[in-house]
Every structure is written in C-alpha cells, then in structure tokens.
Image (cartoon, helix red, strand yellow):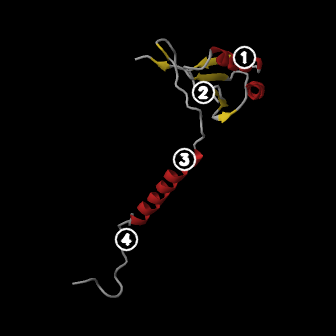
C-alpha cells in the first residue's frame, strides 16, 4: 500500500532534487550569452603579415593595433599617436619592464608602424614586439 500514517517516519531524505539547480544554471548561462557581446571591446580589423621566423611572447597590457586605413588603437580603444605616447609614459613609470605589442595590418605603410614604435620608445617603453601570422 502507500506509506504509514502517523509517526515512525523519522529517516532523513536521501535524495536531492536537482531540477531547481539546473534551472538556475540555465538562466545564468543565458544571461552570460546575452551580455557577452556588450562586454567585448571593439577592436580594429587587422590582417597580420605572414613570416616564417618568429617567437612566442608573453601577452602585454600595452597592445597597439594599426588598421589598414591608418587608425591606431591601444588595448582596443581608438587613440592618436600622441595619446599612445602619453599612455606609454604613464605605463612605463608604473612598470619599467613593460613590453608593447604592435599589431599592424599587412597593407599598412611602413611609416605608420615606425610612428607607433617611435611613440612607444619616446614614451619610455624600451621593449616591443611585432605580431605576425606564422607561415604554415
């Protein structure tokens, strides 16, 4: 028959209902999926040049991008060369061992890359790297 009526049912519940937990996790997942595009920083579209030689370098908090149209961005935020120089001065004062990473489109004129390197070095950052796509 069914269960006993009255006392005598003093045993602890040995099951855990996970349905509410799964519901909460799915809601959190949906929230992350919806908010991620708003959190991502816009960046410049850069087609890196290919090279056969190149070494891995550690990620840096000072990353410069140069687009094909000649736009500069520091850590994903559009900036002029003068502003990059000012930021380099601030960053090098805080961390003298900081390394700048320069990502330039393969069709960018050489002068734009030199301007970025000059801004970084005159701002006090002594180490820099140029990103490439590894040849296959």
Question: Which one is closest to the eye, mark 2 or mark 4?
Answer: 2
Q: Dot 2: what SS?
A: loop
Q: Name above or below for residue 24 compared with residue 70.
A: below
Q: Name above or below for residue 2 compared with residue 116.
A: below
Q: Which residue is label 2 attached to? A: 67
Which of the two labelled residues, at mark 1 and mark 3, occupies the earlier sequence position? 3
Residue at the front extreme?
A: 69
Q: Quadrant of residue 76?
A: top right
Question: Which one is closest to the eye, mark 2 or mark 3?
Answer: 2
Q: Dot 3: what SS?
A: helix
Left or right side of 41 for 47: left
Residue sitting at x 78%, y 27%: 86
Which of the two labelled residues, at mark 2 and mark 3, occupies the earlier sequence position? 3
Name the spot of residue 99 as percent of width and height, x first.
65, 22
Residue sitting at x 58%, y 48%: 38
Q: Which residue is label 4 attached to? A: 13
Q: Name above or below for residue 124 compared with residue 18.
A: above
Which image quarter holds the N terminus?
A: bottom left
C-alpha span from label 2 to label 4 = 63 Å
Disc assigned to residue 37: 3
**Marks 3 and 1: in contact by CB < 8 Å?**
no
Q: Dot 1: what SS?
A: helix
Q: Label 2: few (<14), some or many (≥20) within 10 Å?
A: many
Residue sitting at x 66%, y 31%: 73
């Amino acid at each position: 028959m069914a269960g006993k009526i009255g006392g005598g049912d003093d045993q602890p519940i040995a099951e855990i209902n996970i349905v509410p937990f799964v519901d909460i996790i799915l809601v959190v997942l949906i929230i992350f999926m919806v908010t991620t595009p708003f959190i991502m920083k816009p960046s410049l579209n850069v087609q890196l040049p290919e090279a056969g030689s190149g070494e891995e370098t550690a990620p840096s908090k000072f990353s410069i991008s140069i687009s094909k149209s000649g736009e500069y961005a520091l850590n994903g935020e559009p900036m002029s060369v003068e502003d990059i120089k000012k930021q380099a001065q601030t960053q090098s004062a805080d961390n003298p061992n900081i390394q700048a990473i320069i990502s330039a489109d393969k069709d960018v004129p050489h002068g734009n890359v030199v301007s970025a390197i000059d801004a970084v070095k005159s701002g006090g950052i002594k180490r820099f790297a140029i990103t490439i796509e590894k040849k296959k």
